[in-house]
Amino acid sequence: MADENKISASQSVKSCCRFHWRGKVTVIVPLVTLPILVIGYIKNAPEFRCLYLVVNMALFWVTECMPLYLTSLLPIVFLPIFGILDSNAVCRLFFTDTLIMFLGGLFVALAVEYSNLHQRIALGTILVVGCSPRRLHFGLSMVTCFISFWISNSAATAMMCPIVKAILMEMDAQNSFQVYMTQEEERMEEGDPPHLSKVSMAFYFGVAYSATIGGTGTLIGTGTNLTYKGLYETRFPNIKEKVDFPKFMMYAMPFVSIVNVLLVFLTLQVTHMGLWRPKSDVAKQVKRGSISKSATKLVLQERYSALGRWTCHEIQVGIIFVMMILLLFFQRPGFMKGWADVLNTKHIGGASPVLITVIVLFALPTQYTFFRYCCKGPPFTGRSMDACISWIFLHNNTPWGLCFLLGGGFALAEGSKVSGMAKMLGDSLAFITVMPNSLIIAFIVVVSLFCTCFSANVAICNILIPIFSEMAVTVKVHPLTLTLPAALAISMSYHLPVSTPPNAIICGYAYIKTKYLAVAGILPTLWAFIIILLNSISWAHIIYPTIKKFPAKEFLEK
């Protein structure tokens, strides 16, 4: 009887730890880190009080013992309580120009999805590129990368996954190549879905990695970029070198995005599809798959035909989308006077041109059939015209929690700056002042690539960028030289599902095991390190020629 009680007690403890570990971590972590707060009050050091909040939020973000978005609201509670910022100052940071620009970009991206324009662009491009396995892989990767320039990487991945699935199903029906692993290659439990083969996984990896890379190409490509912009401008509001849409695009797109995605495509071709290894089994399968490309093309043509002719809705959304890109690019392009300079009014941020396009989307109807009733008599239609975007669709599909995540990061960065915590951490890294700039950048990129493997990109950006900003001031290097490569590296997450939404989407959608994702991401991570490093010590000085010099003191004032 005593043994049974011991077993029952042991099972109860295990069940409690297994199913309620989050609640325990939420209580234990603040207690373990409490000495930091005690030191802060004993020494009357606000930097330690802020450090206590930052450490707890970082651990909450990494472990996700509390929802990411709820953790992001903690600065509203504790920054005023710790005597660092007042409530009004903190809450204003949850509704900044950068955050509204992010939200407006999401709305426009959802309008593209609402009109189904993204499907037409994707399928049309793939049909043009070709339908052999290698060409399909290239087409899927490049199209995903391009779409991810303008809409969120998670939306681009989610859009492409059904297309990849349809292609693989047709390949399996035609016996083009081995789509699934055998029981000997990967043991499958009863009721489990079949495991994809290496060739099949290459298609999903290509889509996820291309979406991640494409997100780094423009300021609106991913929330991490806009988070970085907000953190940088919060810390250095008076600095001459701004992070605006055209400069960021010219800095990141040529090498960090386009060259990088080509290298990742070639890497997956070599590792998963037998490129330059004609005698390997996978290469023979891919070659066999090229024979049945006509059947695959037929499937894609059927999906494209099902979309019908171009609709007025799609054309209008496409025009408005291009209008938004042009407004952002020519706002202050640098090489000529922008429209914001011509107006010569108060400072116009990125939110204004983005929200103009959102308003236009709500103002224009999907079709103009109502004109036929203007000059005719009854009977008249009783049906109202839909707008190019529906508020209900936006409300249901917008990740509103990301606004809290970005706002929490901005509040944390401001608290770190005002309290002196970021400067304290930056000064602690002063030992690297003896290193050449290229080695300092390499160190920062490695730290960023490593940290982003274990938590969400935006959360890691909120933690690292304020520290790197102060480090730049300490080692007397232009802040852009250190922080912009770090921000791009933070987006390059290839190893774990938790790292970035595209990884999580393909793992959940295609039932890909984490071990395959982790191995596949090794070489892409290496390419990311090399390209970001080379980009920051060469191309960066062409786009931002003044970053060779450390800014004057007045430009670094908070």
Image (cartoon, grey):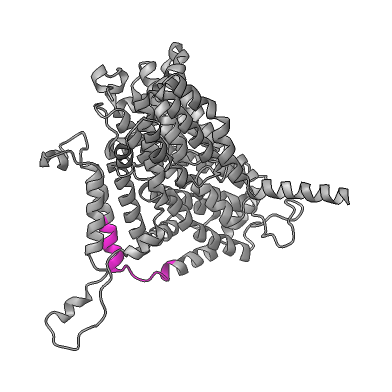
Q: Is residue 322 left or right of residue 29?
A: left
Q: Residue 54: x and y, percent?
A: 46, 32
In the image, residue 201 above or below residue 474:
below
Of residue 292 and residue 370, the one placed in the foreground of this image is 370
Identified at 48% across, 38% down, the residue is: 492
Identified at 43% across, 42% down, the residue is: 72
Was residue 314 drawn as part of the magenta stretch in this picture?
Answer: yes
Q: Residue 403: x and y, percent?
A: 37, 47
Identified at 32% across, 25% down, the residue is: 541
Residue 515 visible in image: yes
Residue 274 visible in image: no
Q: Main secondary structure of the magenta part?
A: helix
In the image, residue 307 above or below residue 154:
below
Q: Is residue 408 left or right of residue 177?
A: left
Identified at 62% across, 40% down, the residue is: 519
Q: Residue 261: x and y, percent?
A: 46, 41
Q: Is residue 130 left or right of residue 5?
A: left
Of residue 159 and residue 419, the one placed in the foreground of this image is 419
For the C terminus, the quadrant is top left
Of residue 39 and residue 57, the one placed in the foreground of this image is 39
- Please give the range of residues in magenta: 304-320
Residue at the outermost top position: 434
Q: Residue 193: x and y, percent?
A: 66, 60
Was residue 82 drawn as part of the magenta stretch in this picture?
Answer: no
Of residue 138 and residue 226, the one placed in the foreground of this image is 226
